[in-house]
Image (spheres, grey):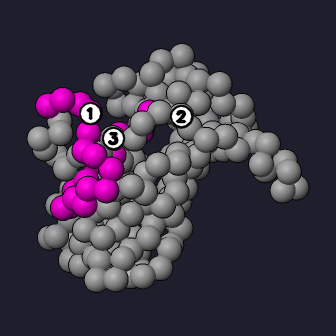
Amino acid sequence: MLLALLLTASPVAGKVTARQGPLSPWDRGGAGAPAGVSFQSPMVLDVPLPGLATARDGETLWVEDVSQFDCRGVRIRQLSLTPTLRRDGRVRLDPFLVFHAEEGADPRASVRLELMDGDEIVGAWWLRDFSTMEGHGRAGKITNAVLREDTFRALQRGRPALRLTVETHRGTRSEAPFAAR
């Protein structure tokens, strides 16, 4: 069983870029911030997904280098997508995120995950007001990330990428203006 999981999981190649959202100095050049930068909330991560073009049904795509950036002490340690064709002809993406909050970090996070084809948003979903557990790792999953199969196949032929907008807050909605939309 473990061998089967290892054979179906593949890392995603491509450089993750980060910037202060919604606008930052790193937007102009498109290169993103250098690794190790700590951002205020919100932080935007742009993640290329070239492996999606050849992903087989049920294959897990892991993004390796998202943990090099943090949003007010909260990092995404792991990020994966597992596109799976459902019986109703739609594709479920199963985004899985593992957060880690440093001591003194904001205890709650919201993540807007946008599936992109170049500059076009193909789908968007939320993980809202998630408890990050200060000093610990915690896993979260977006369960409603579903696309029509034809939309997913067109995306595979395009330039697939993810954009994650990460907001952290102390627990009041007024501190997370983007997540309240």
**Amino acid carrying mark 1 in the image:** Ala
Q: Where is residue 125 in the image (x, y as percent from the top left)?
A: 40, 48
Q: Earlier in the sequence, mark 2 or mark 1?
A: 2
Residue 71 part of the magenta-drawn span:
no
Report the side of 152 relative to 163 (left or right): right
Report the side of 20 relative to 50 (left or right): left
Q: Position of residue 141 (x, y in %)?
A: 53, 60
The quarter holding residue 168 reads bottom left
Q: Position of residue 145 (x, y in %)?
A: 51, 46
Quarter of the image with the N terminus is: bottom right
Is residue 166 among what the camera can see? no
Q: Where is residue 41 in the image (x, y as percent from the top left)?
A: 20, 61
Q: Which mark is residue 13?
A: 2
Measured Cα–Cα span from mark 2 to mark 1:
16 Å
Q: Determine the secondary structure under disc 2.
A: loop
Q: Which mark is residue 17?
A: 3
Residue 38 part of the magenta-drawn span:
yes
Give the residues drawn in magenta, as a range: 28-48
**Amino acid carrying mark 2 in the image:** Ala
Is residue 1 among what the camera can see? yes
Report the side of 120 relative to 88 (left or right): left
State the residue at coordinates (30%, 70%): 73
- Within 10 Å of disc 1 (Cα), the crowding (few <14, some 14-19, many 20+) is few
Relative vertical location of residue 58 with respect to residue 155 in this rendering, above or below: below
Report the side of 7 relative to 179 (left or right): right
Do the residues under discs 1 and 3 have CB atoms within 8 angstroms?
A: yes
- Within 10 Å of disc 2 (Cα), the crowding (few <14, some 14-19, many 20+) is some
Q: Determine the secondary structure under disc 1.
A: loop
Measured Cα–Cα span from mark 1 to mark 3:
7 Å
**Amino acid carrying mark 3 in the image:** Thr
Do the residues under discs 2 and 1 have CB atoms within 8 angstroms?
A: no
Q: Residue 31 carries which label?
A: 1
